[in-house]
Image (spheres, rainbow, N blue to C red):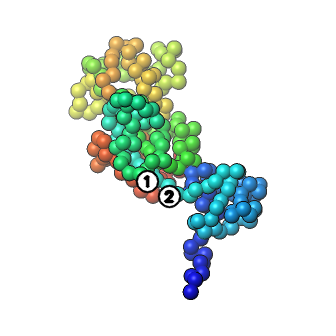
Amino acid sequence: MKKIKNDEDKIRLNKFISNSGFCSRREADKFIMMGLVKVNGKLITQMGYKISPNDNVICDDRKIISENLIYILINKPKGYFSSDKKGEFKKNVLELINSKKHQKIQPVVKMDRTSLGLLLLTNDLVMIKKLNANNHKINKIIEVELDKNISKIHLDIIKSGKVFDKIKNFNVDEINHIKDEPKRKVGIKTRNENYKLLKDVFNKLGYQIRYSDRVVFAHLTKKDLPRGRWRYLNSKEINFLKMI
């Protein structure tokens, strides 16, 4: 006897579209109301409409393939790109996450090859777009090691930002020596992390950066996450990021 599917096997159409990373659930509702969504060739404008996971869904002329959204935090080592750059001797952070189901994940607020520390990866295209657009709202703490000790006077100059008229769009909320560490190591709290600008600022004062390490990203930290290792975010961490 053929099993009859019930509502427990089905999912709301707007959630199905949102889970694909194509758009948010609210935006999916708008597509539905505008008559831009078809299920198995049938135009659907009914809000709350439910579908089976294997139904053929077309939204704004694009086929929607819903998948589980994945959120990964990795402690990026030096020498790995967070972009899709390819070629000899160019290593991608995705190589550190050896799993086929993670092939579609992308970095949020990218890092260059020489930078270390926390990097968020996800297949949630809505979150990627939102966090990159609201990058200036995300608190970040970066540990920087210089080629020599830096004075408190120079730290105060960097924090003021007044002497760097030609270095625009750079400011720090806090900058201090790291407790119980050599005076060449400083911690920087900023919302507009930019390695090139950071390098230019220290160069103007006669210092070279040996490395920069992103140790805090939003509410996420490196606790129990050694260099080169990764973990999934929990639901509380994901919900916090969605509120930014």
Which residue is drawn at the image coordinates 48% and 15% (left, top)? 164
Q: Nearer the viewer, residue 232 or 185?
A: 232
In this rendering, the label closer to the viewer, 2 or 1? 1
- Residue 235 rendering spot, x and y as whole percentages: 45, 58
Amino acid type of the residue tagged 1 in the rendering: Lys
Would you say 78 lies left or right of 49 here?
left
Q: Residue at x 55, y 47 (%)?
A: 125
Q: Residue furthest front?
A: 1
| Quarter of the N terminus within the rendering | bottom right
Residue at which label 1 appears:
101
Label 1 crowd (10 A; few <14 / some 14-19 / many >=20): few
Number of numbered discs visible in the structure rendering: 2
Q: Position of residue 80 (x, y in %)?
A: 36, 34
* In the displayed structure image, the side of residue 18 where residue 112 appears, left or right: left
Q: Earlier in the sequence, mark 2 or mark 1?
A: 2
**Which dot marks residue 68?**
2
Placement of 89 over or under 239, stated as above or below: above
Amino acid tagged 2? Asn
Quarter of image, res 210: top left
Where 117 sits versus 147, above or below?
below
Q: CA distance from mark 2 to mark 1?
A: 10 Å
Q: Is residue 232 left or right of residue 61?
A: left
Q: Is residue 21 above or below residue 167?
A: below
Give the x, y percent position of residue 58: 67, 56
Q: Note whether residue 115 is visible.
A: no
Query: Residue placed at 34% from the left, 29% from the top?
Result: 89
| Residue 87 in view, yes or no | yes
